[in-house]
Amino acid sequence: MAIRTRFAPAHRRLMVAIVALPLLIAGAALVFAWPAARVSPRSVPVGIVSTSPVAPPAGFSFRPYADAAAAKEAIRTRHVYGAFVITPNDVTVLKASAASPAVAQLLDTAGSAMASAAKARLTSVDVVPTARSDPRGLVLSSALLPLTICSILVAAVVMLFLGQVSTRHRLGGLVGTALAGGLGAYLIAQEFLGALPHQPFETWAALSLTMLAICAPTAGLLAHAGPPGIGVAAAVMVFVGNPFSGVTSAPQLMPSAVDHIGQLLPPGAGASLVRNAAYFNGSDSAGHLLVLGLWSAFGLAAVFLGRPARTPMSTVPSRWRQHAAAN
C-alpha cells in the first residue's frame, strides 16, 4: 500500500502528460495549419481604371482611380495592393510583389481571366517589385519565427541569467539588445541576402521595435509570474502571433478575424512595418507603430513595476549554495 501511495503522484503526472502533451501538439498544428489552409482573397483592396463599369472578381474590392498614374501612386502608398487598367483592347495589371507575392499572383490570374473574356491584350507591370535576390519574398517570412523566438530568449537571458542587477540595467538590457538584434537581423537580411534593399535606417528601426515589442512583454511576464511567463509569451507570440501574422500571404487572405488578431500582435504588426519600411517609404505604418509601441511600453512598464526576477541560483536550496561557496 505504501508503495502505491508513493508512486501514485508520479502516475498521475504521467497520465496528465500523456493527455496534455498530445492536446498541446494538436493545438499547435491547428493554429499553424488552419490559416494556411484557408488562404483566400477576402475584400482585397484593388484599384480600377476603366471608362465602363466592371464587376470585381470574387474576393476583391475595387476602388476607382482617374488614370494609371493615380493607381500607381495608390499602390506605392499602400492604399491598394494593385490595380486593373482596362481599355477596349488592353487589360493592364498593376501589382506590387513587394506588398505580397501571393496577392500579385492572384491579380495576374484575375487579369488574365478578364483579358480572355474581353478578347483583349494582357500586360503586367510590377510597380513595387521585391529585391532581385529575393524574388518570392521569402526572407522576411522565413525570418519572422526565429526573430520571435530569439526575442523571447532575450527576455529570458536579461531577466533570469544576468544575476541580481537593477531594474534600470534590465530595462537598458532589453532596449540595447533589441537595437543590436535588429541591426544584426538587418545586416543578414540585406547585406548578406539582399532582401531589404531600401531605407536602411527605417528598416533597422522597424526590426528593433519588433524585437522590443516581443521581448519587453515577455520580460514583464517574467517579472510578475516568474518562469511560467515564458510559456505564456510563447503561446501568444509564437503559437498565435506567427501563424496569424499573414506574412507568408497577406492579412486580407487570412480567415475572418484572424487578420485583425494577427495585426494586433507584435509578429504581424512587425512584419507589416518592416515590409512598409523596406519597400514603401513607411507608408500606411501608423497603426503598426501604435501596436508595437503599446506592446513595448506595456512590457517595459511591467518590468519597472515588477519584482526582481529570480535567477537560476536563487532557486537552489540554501544549503547547496553554502556548500558550493565553501568549495
Image: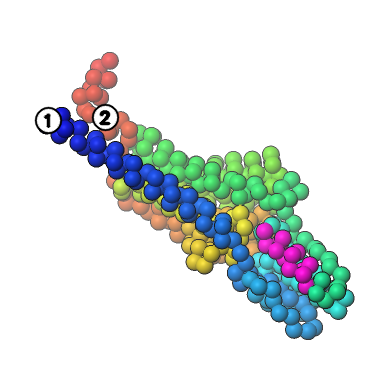
Span colored in magenta: 102-115
Q: How is the image coloured?
A: rainbow
On screen, 59 above or below 244?
below
Query: Mark 1 to mark 2: distance in Å?
Result: 30 Å
Instruction: Depth check: give the residue in front, 208 or 134.
Output: 134
Can you give x and y, in whole percent of width and height, for residue 47 in the image?
Answer: 71, 73
Can you name the residue that lies furthest to the top here?
Answer: 327
On screen, 232 above or below 314?
below
Can you give x and y, in whole percent of width and height, for residue 88 in the image?
Answer: 86, 79
| Sequence-earlier tag: 1 or 2 | 1
| Label 2, residues with CA under 10 Å away: few <14, some 14-19, many ≥20 | few
Task: Write down the residue under mark 1.
Answer: 2
Residue depth check, mark 1 versus mark 2: number of the one nearer the observer: 1
The residue under the point 37% across, 44% down is 21
The residue under the point 53% across, 64% down is 255
Can you give x and y, in whole percent of width and height, for residue 40 in the image?
Answer: 61, 64
Residue 53 location, quadrant? bottom right
On screen, 140 above or below 91?
above
- 47 with respect to 291 (left or right): right
Dot 2: what SS?
loop
- Asked whether residue 169 appears in the rendered view, the answer is no
| Label 1, residues with CA under 10 Å away: few <14, some 14-19, many ≥20 | few
Q: Residue 19: which disc?
A: none
- Whether 156 is among the magenta residues is no
Residue 38 location, quadrant? bottom right
Task: Write down the residue under mark 2.
Answer: 316
